[in-house]
Image (cartoon, grey):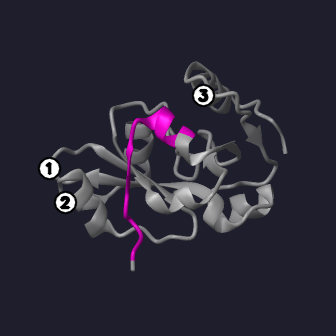
Amino acid sequence: MKPAQHPTALRVQALLHEQGLDVRVVEFEQPTRTSAEAAAAIGCTVAEIAKSVVFRGKESGQAVVVVASGDNRVCERKVAALVGEKLGRADADFVRTATGYVIGGVSPLGHAQPVKLVLDEDLRRFSTVWAAAGTPFSVFPLAPEQLVQITAAAWGSVRQE
């Protein structure tokens, strides 16, 4: 683990500071694309990873970003009910265009275009969670309350039962 050096991770670091958060973006030599990879690199549980899952709104065409607990499968039906439209799959090109980030590095803030954002209420069970910082090698820690602060998103039940 080392301080962030990638320009995208440094941009996320600056955005966090602009939001009033004194957190440090860190980078790893190995990728942290998946929740399991991130948890292994950080030394936390998979559930403490705030993974970003991106869908495409079928009516709006807008990206729907779900920040979910790493151990949860996201229920598309529940998310659709929360955002008020049916969802479709988002391919890598759509994710990059809509969020400004590659799959495996989608940060909860600083998106290239406006997105609909939903936070998995299961993240509230932890004092600290780890979110992607714009690259598949960078992450940052924050409290669940800080996640609400930087995203202005609401908590919702998104876990597939």
Q: Earlier in the sequence, mark 3 or mark 1?
A: 3
Residue beneath label 1, please?
A: 59
Q: Earlier in the sequence, mark 1 or mark 2?
A: 1
Q: CA distance from mark 1 to mark 2?
A: 7 Å
At 41% from the left edge and 67% from the top edge, which residue is drawn?
A: 74
Q: Is residue 87 visible?
A: no
In x, y percent, where is residue 40?
A: 77, 64
The amino acid pointed to by label 3 is: Leu
Which segment is the magenta one? 146-160
Quadrant location of residue 152? top left
The residue furthest right is 2
The mark closer to the camera, 2 or 3, is 3
In x, y percent, where is residue 112?
A: 42, 30
Q: Is residue 35 visible?
A: yes
Q: CA distance from mark 2 to mark 3?
A: 31 Å
When the figure is inspected, residue 131 is found, relative to residue 9, above or below; the finding is below
The residue furthest top is 18
In x, y percent, where is residue 60?
A: 18, 44
The amino acid pointed to by label 1 is: Glu
When the figure is inspected, residue 93 is found, relative to residue 158, above or below; the finding is above
At 57% from the left edge and 70% from the top edge, which residue is drawn?
A: 71
Q: Tell me whether circle 1 and circle 2 mark residues in contact (CB < 8 Å).
A: yes
Secondary structure under tag 2 reads loop
